[in-house]
Amino acid sequence: MDAIWTLGNQDTPRYAPLNADADADVAIIGAGITGLTTALTLAEAGQKVIVLEAREVGGGVTGGSTGNLYSTLASGQASIRKKWGDEVSRDVIRARSEAVDVIEALIERFAIDCQFQRQPAYRVEPANDSKAGYDWDEEKAALADAGLDVEAADHPGLPFATQGIKISDQAQFNPLHYVQGLATVASDLGVIIHEHSPVRNVDHKQGTVTTDTACVSARHVVYATHTPKGLNLLQAGMLVSREYAVSARLKSGHYPEGIIWAMDPFHSLRSYRQGNEQHVIVIGEKHKTGEQKGDHYRHLQEYLQTHFDVEAFTSQWSAQQYSSPDGLPYIGRLHGQDTVYLATGFAADGLTWGTLAAMIISDQVLGRDNPWQARFDARRITPGKSATQYTKENAHVARHMFKDYLSTEKLKEADEVAPGQARVAKVDGEELAIHRTEDGQLKVLSAVCPHMKCIVHWNNAESTWDCPCHGSRFDCDGEVIEGPSYHPLARRIR
Ligand code: FES
């Protein structure tokens, strides 16, 4: 099932794949919020821009996001203040507030129909939950000292008693309709967008971006791909995780308003109206990519059923997150490259970081100063703040690199896999990812991730092959869905 944002989406313009070599001032890889905001900004400044999207506009993590726009971080302001201190905590709020204002201004200026509305954000826990133990005073002080309007409050519309805090003047929208609107405006301004054009190689020295069919030559290249494609030092130490979402219609018609983070231990809740229908959405069940265990969608359905009078479930989807080791995103020029740019490490807060990334990268391309460029510099080295996660995630990758090869089961024939099953197995000395569809079709792929040779794992919730090392994900036919791998899983004829 697709994300709820696709409801009522019939008249979306589509863009032809790249089928001939082309030149541009700027080649942007990825047509999500980062890529399209960058493209639009640069086109307005007179740059010739080509955007290459592997799937469809907003079809990656932007279209799988919550549609929540906020100045703080979903993980809480106190943790970033503890790690970085008061000045950075304030900068995070100021930079992200500016980014939300930019989104609002673009929506107004170009009349983008995406249901943008200012809403408060609530961070709450079940009232009188002695186990929760969240430090509200600390979080409230961190938010207030960073410049936000915050007060102690429960959530007025939740069907269970809560205690916590309220942050005024945040926002919500439909993220897919927003980026589709950006694409239309950018296209009208001369940006050339190509969908279904996965990039297979980027040559930084030559400034060439190559797809299966053609090549774009550009003075500047922007990786707006959530994580840079290919090998990049920033992938080491990044925590890659997936989170799930379920939406439902309620019998009562009483839907909670605003952005709600329920610390129970963590669910994100919001409502969404499409036409005459309203839906409540819950997001949670986070786990490391490639380590899916249990029925995450069912758990979220049960959560909704426990707290709300569910009439029917209407949608379910999941999305990926890259969390940087020092807690801030990496935005700007690549190490050793003055005309290649990236944006990654957005954690769960990507719509706002993605917009900020577009502001910073556009200014860098145009040779303009940006007040936030140094703060979120992709070239920064912060060993003191990164060491713990960096060590942990590198050990995690090393563990998978060795353990997964050593523990792969042996099969005589790929044929042994039953309908509806997926297994990673060694057959004739080769690690294979074998999936038999419910109707009996056998799909056999190499289980070796083309990025850095880790073994992929089956994700039962999504029917995908997910790599636990740096988050490359592949569909049942091996094609890349997202992540750093340029290339699909190799097909094996059986
Ligand atoms: Fe890096 Fe698979 S994503 S090895």
Image (spheres, rainbow, N blue to C red):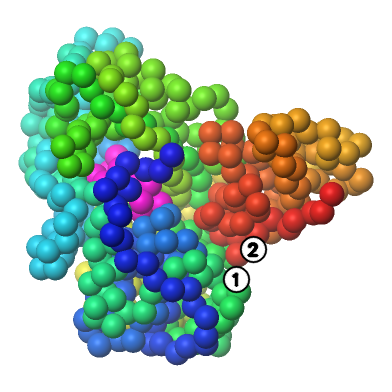
Residue 73 lies in the magenta stretch: yes
How far is the residue under mark 2 from the one under mark 1?
A: 6 Å
The quadrant holding residue 453 is bottom right
Residue 441 at x, y = what percent?
A: 72, 42
Secondary structure mainly formed by the magenta segment:
loop
* For residue 449, above or below residue 83: below
* For residue 429, above or below residue 412: below
Span highlighted in magenta in the image: 61-74
| Residue 389 in sight | no
Residue 268 lies in the magenta stretch: no
Given residues 468 and 369, the one toward you in this image is: 468
Q: Are marks 2 and 1 in contact (CB under 8 Å)?
A: yes
Q: Badge 1: few (under 14), some or many (20 or more) residues near its Cα, within 10 Å? A: some
Residue 449 at x, y = what percent?
A: 68, 53
Task: Report helix, strand or loop for mark 1.
Answer: strand
Residue behind label 1 places its C-beta within 8 angstroms of ligand 1:
no
